[in-house]
Amino acid sequence: MTHEPLTRDRVAEARRIVVKVGSSSISGENVGQIAPLVDALASSHERGAEVVLVSSGAIATGMPYLRLDARPDDLATQQAAASVGQNILIYRYQESLRRFGIVAGQVLLTAGDLENDTHRLNAQRAMERLLGLRIMPIVNENDTVATHEIRFGDNDRLAAMVAELIGADLLVLLSDVDALYTRPPHLEGAEPIPHVAYGDELAGVEIGSIGRAGVGTGGAETKVSAARIAAASGTGVLVTATSLVADALTGARVGTWFEPAAR
């Protein structure tokens, strides 16, 4: 890892990377995006980078197996769907990673794990050991045991906290939108924002709070909030679309770059 903050020009040189993907990008009709996502992660792994994937999707993946047409509202059914879906989700990732000889390690966290000093240290030690063994950690919120009161709320925030936990130099937040826009991108006059300086409050920018799909919980608002958490800890952040992840990790000028604070 470098001690100097990562610049956009050096994204392709990042040594420790956290990539977050949302439910709508890898479940349902988009399950086919897992393979190209894994291709991009494997490419970074094979050049020597340490890569952590934070993946939503346990509940969305489990829904069809519980014969659910919509995301359940009650906590017990969400937990049941997550229990089934997490198993299937990890299997799908491992099957895709096998093409590259990469082994995944499942890491399930609750908000309490990163707020309690002892649990946080344990999580950090486990992650460091996995990375040292060249295992790819796949992190998700432990939806099966998390309660409404102790949830991260969305995996963008979880990804930012994981990036901080392991001292990542790059965090890539993926969704179905290619960048942060000056207003919701479906509205007239919306313009992509290529760069956000550290400390920029984004005055005048209209940030929507809801994603396009009905299975996720994180929209642009959560992306910006998470990006600020990670940037404050010295991690450069790129917000872009799942379909552009390969371009993002190889340094192409895609998405919105959040400049990190000096470490």
Image: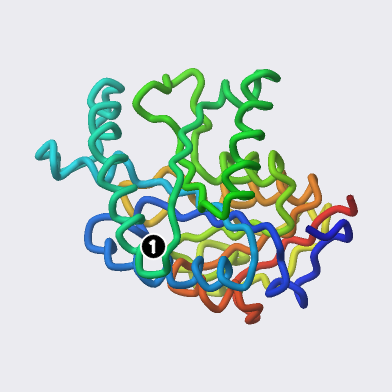
* Front residue of this view, candidates 68 and 52: 52
Residue in the image at 56% along x and 66% along y:
45
Q: Please tell me whether residue 82 is drawn above or below residue 102 in the rendered image.
A: above
Q: Is residue 109 above or below residue 96?
A: above
Residue type, label 1: Leu
Residue 67: x and y in percent read 9, 39
Q: Which residue is mark 1?
A: 97
Drawn side of residue 60 relative to residue 161, left or right: left
Instruction: Count neighbours of disc 1 (C-alpha within 10 A) and say few if under 14, some if 14 to 19, many if 20 or more.
Output: many
- Left/right placement of residue 127 relative to residue 95 reads right
Q: Helix, strand or loop at disc 1?
A: helix
Location of residue 158 in the rendering, given as x and y in whole percent from the top left corner: 56, 39
Q: Residue furthest bottom?
A: 252
Q: How is the image coloured?
A: rainbow
The residue closer to the viewer here, 250 or 152, is 250
User: Residue drawn 75% across and 54% down?
Assistant: 235
- Residue at the far left in the pictured view: 67
Image quadrant where residue 6 sits: bottom right
- Position of the N terminus, as image quadrant, is bottom right
Q: Nearer the viewer, residue 62 or 108?
A: 108
- Residue in the picture at 70% in, 66% down: 257
Where in the figure is residue 130, as x and y percent of width and height? 57, 45
